[in-house]
Image (cartoon, rainbow, N blue to C red):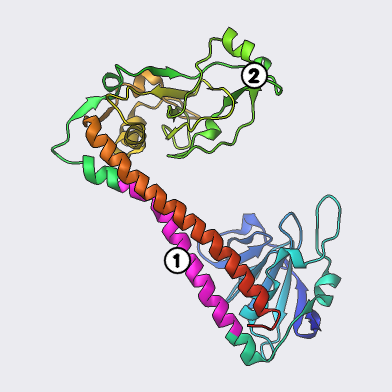
C-alpha cells in the first residue's frame, strides 16, 4: 500500500472559478461534486484524472474524467502518474464512499491532507490494466441490464398500442364507458386543520400516483371520525387513481391496498370499475396510453399549472373492448411484470456479485 500523493498529483478543483452561469449548450464537461454538472467553453485539463466529490452528503463519490474537461468547486482532483498508474484501475479502487474519512458535523467534507495520505494498492501497471479490463466488462454487463430494465415499462404501452390503435378499433366516451362503475369521483377536500399525524386513516397524495405504478411516498393522516365527518370516499384495492395535476397530467395507477384505511386528496380521481365491463390493468393502460394523453392535453385548463376536471376526463375516448379481451391483455401484462421482477432480482444479485468482485480485485485475489 502507498500514499495516494506518491502516485498522483492532488489538486483542489474549481480553480477557474466557473459555475452554472458559465454553462453552454456545447462545450467541455464540467465536473462538480455530483459528476458532470454541465458544459463550459474552456477546457482546464487534457488528461485523465479521478474527480473526488469532497463536500456534501455524497462526498467520497468519484468520477473518471477523460479527454478534455474542467473542474468545478467542491472537488479534489487526483491526477495519476500515467507511467505508474492506470486511471481506470485507480478510479475503480477509489470510487467507494465508505473508504474515505469524512470531517465536519453538519456538512461533511474530505480534507485535502486526507486525500494525499489516503492509502491505495498499486500492483504493476500490467496487472492494473488486467484488473481494470475485468471490471470494465462487469460494468458493461450491468449497464446492459439497466437498459433492459428501463425498456420494460414501455412494453405495456407498446402492447396496448399494437392491440388497440387501428382503424378497426371502436371508441367510446370515457364517461359513458364508466356509467356502471361503482365509483367515479374526485378525492376529498381535506385541509391541514383536518389532519392528525396520529390518525388511523391514511390520506394519500398526488405524489403517490405514478405513471402506471403506485409510488407509496406520502405520510399524512386523519382520524376515522374526521374522515366520516367529511364523508370521504374510502379506497379499495384495485381502485384506479388518476392524477388530475402534473406531472404527467392524467397519469394513472392501481391502488394496491394498505394495512390502514385510506382516502385520497381532491386532485386525484378515483375509479372503481364494474368488473363486468372493465379489467383494472387494461383500464389503467388505456388511461396512460399516448392517444388518451393527447386528448387530455386538449381539455387541460390552468395557466401556471395544468389540471383536468373529472367532467372533462369523461369527455375523452377509450377503445371499446370486451372485458374478455381486456383480461387477455392483463394476463400478458402480468407476464411482463413477472419478467421485470425477475430482472430486478437478477440485477440486485449482480450488484452484490459486482461489489464482491471489486473487493476481491483490490485485495489482490483476482
Q: Main secondary structure of the magenta part?
A: helix
Whole-percent x and y of residue 9?
76, 80
In the image, residue 86 sits, relative to residue 57, either above or below, namely below
Q: Residues within 10 Å of mark 1 (few under 14, many from 20)?
A: few
Secondary structure at badge 2 equals strand
Mark 1 to mark 2: distance in Å? 45 Å
**Is residue 25 among what the camera can see?**
no
Does 155 appear in magenta? Answer: yes
Please indicate whether residue 190 sits to the left or right of residue 181 in the image.
right
In the image, residue 338 sits, relative to residue 42, either above or below, namely above
Q: Which residues are magenta?
A: 131-158
Residue 144 is labelled as 1
Task: Please tell me which of labels 1 and 2 falls first in the chain.
Answer: 1
Query: What residue occupies the far top of the structure in this picture?
Result: 229
Whole-percent x and y of residue 103?
85, 60
The foreground one among 320 and 296 is 320
Secondary structure at badge 1 equals helix
The quarter of the picture where residue 212 lies is: top left
Whole-percent x and y of residue 211?
44, 39
**Is residue 112 among what the camera can see?**
yes
Image quadrant where one finds the N terminus: bottom right
Residue that carries the numbered disc 2 in the rendered image: 222
Does 217 appear in magenta? Answer: no
Residue 199 is labelled as none
Amino acid at each position: 500500500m502507498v500514499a495516494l500523493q506518491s502516485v498522483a498529483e492532488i489538486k483542489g478543483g474549481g480553480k477557474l472559478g466557473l459555475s452554472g452561469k458559465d454553462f453552454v449548450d456545447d462545450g467541455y464537461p464540467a465536473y462538480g461534486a455530483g459528476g458532470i454538472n454541465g458544459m463550459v467553453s474552456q477546457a482546464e485539463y487534457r488528461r485523465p484524472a479521478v474527480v473526488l466529490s469532497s463536500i456534501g452528503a455524497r462526498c467520497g463519490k468519484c468520477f473518471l474524467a477523460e479527454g478534455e474537461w474542467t473542474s468545478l468547486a467542491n472537488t479534489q482532483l487526483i491526477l495519476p502518474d500515467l507511467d505508474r498508474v492506470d486511471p481506470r484501475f485507480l478510479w475503480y479502487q477509489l470510487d467507494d464512499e465508505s473508504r474515505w474519512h469524512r470531517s465536519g458535523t453538519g456538512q461533511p467534507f474530505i480534507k485535502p491532507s486526507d486525500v494525499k495520505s489516503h492509502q491505495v494498492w498499486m500492483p504493476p501497471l500490467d496487472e492494473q490494466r488486467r484488473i481494470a479490463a475485468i471490471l470494465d466488462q462487469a460494468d458493461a454487463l450491468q449497464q446492459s441490464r439497466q437498459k433492459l430494465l428501463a425498456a420494460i415499462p414501455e412494453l405495456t404501452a407498446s402492447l396496448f398500442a399494437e392491440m388497440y390503435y387501428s382503424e378497426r378499433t371502436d371508441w367510446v366516451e370515457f364517461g359513458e364507458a364508466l356509467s356502471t362503475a361503482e365509483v367515479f369521483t374526485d378525492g376529498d377536500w381535506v385541509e391541514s386543520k383536518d389532519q392528525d399525524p396520529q390518525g388511523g386513516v391514511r390520506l394519500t397524495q398526488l405524489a403517490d400516483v405514478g405513471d402506471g405504478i403506485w409510488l407509496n411516498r406520502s405520510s399524512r393522516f386523519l382520524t376515522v371520525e374526521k374522515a366520516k365527518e367529511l364523508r370521504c370516499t374510502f379506497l379499495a384495492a384495485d381502485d384506479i387513481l388518476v392524477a388530475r395535476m402534473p406531472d404527467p397530467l392524467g397519469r394513472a395507477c392501481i391502488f394496491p391496498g394498505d394495512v390502514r384505511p385510506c382516502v385520497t386528496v381532491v386532485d386525484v380521481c378515483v375509479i372503481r370499475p364494474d368488473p363486468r365491463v372493465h379489467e383494472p390493468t387494461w383500464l389503467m393502460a388505456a388511461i396512460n396510453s399516448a392517444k388518451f394523453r393527447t386528448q387530455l392535453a386538449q381539455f387541460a385548463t390552468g395557466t401556471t399549472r395544468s389540471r383536468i376536471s373529472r367532467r372533462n376526463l369523461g369527455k375523452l375516448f377509450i377503445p371499446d373492448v370486451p372485458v374478455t379481451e381486456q383480461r387477455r391483455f392483463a394476463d400478458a401484462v402480468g407476464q411482463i411484470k413477472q419478467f421485470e421482477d425477475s430482472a430486478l432480482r437478477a440485477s440486485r444479485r449482480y450488484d452484490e456479485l459486482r461489489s464482491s468482485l471489486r473487493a476481491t480485485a483490490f485485495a489482490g485475489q483476482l
